[in-house]
Image (cartoon, grey):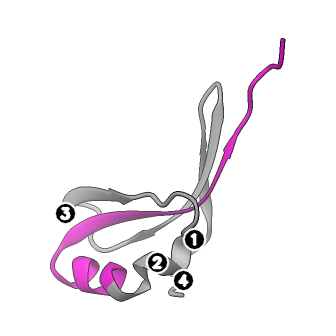
């Protein structure tokens, strides 16, 4: 799996997302998210290709959902 720079995070009221950025910061933004049963490795083949084409890629590696059980 590629690694470019440090792991960054963003937090919403219910979701915490860890991600990497790849490609130029002024490129068209693309967000890659995966779901069960896949993991971040499912984007290995496409991430480098997208970034080389000038896409500002945000590559989610982990998401965590938090909610209150009633």
> From what the image shows, is residue 63 above or below residue 56?
above
Q: CA distance from mark 2 to mark 3?
A: 22 Å
Bounds of the magenta segment:
46-70
Q: Secondary structure at mark 3?
A: loop
Q: Quadrant of the N terminus?
A: bottom right
Do callouts 1 and 3 mark residues in contact (Cβ within 8 Å)? no
First along the sequence among labels 1 and 4: 4
- Residue 50, x across and y down, in percent: 24, 77
Are the residues at dot 1 and dot 2 in contact (C-beta closer than 8 Å)? yes
**Residue 37: x percent and y percent?**
58, 65
Residue identified by numbered label 1: 39
State left or right for residue 19 relative to residue 43: right
**Mark 2 nearby-residue class (10 Å; few <14, some 14–19, many ≥20):** few
Quarter-wise, where is residue 29 in the image? bottom left
- Magenta stretch: includes residue 51: yes
- Separation of disc 1 and disc 4 at Cα? 15 Å
Q: Are marks 2 and 3 in contact (CB under 8 Å)?
A: no
Between residues 57 and 36, which one lies in front from this camera angle?
A: 36
Badge nearest the viewer, 4 or 2: 2
Which residue has dot 4 on it? 3
What distance separates the C-alpha of mark 1 from that of mark 3?
Answer: 25 Å
């Amino acid at each position: 799996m590629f690694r470019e720079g440090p792991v960054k995070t963003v937090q919403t009221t219910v979701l915490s997302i860890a991600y990497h950025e790849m490609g130029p910061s002024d490129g068209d933004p693309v967000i890659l998210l995966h779901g069960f049963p896949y993991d971040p490795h499912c984007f290995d083949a496409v991430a480098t290709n997208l970034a080389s084409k000038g896409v500002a890629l945000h590559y989610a590696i982990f998401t965590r959902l938090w909610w209150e059980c009633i």
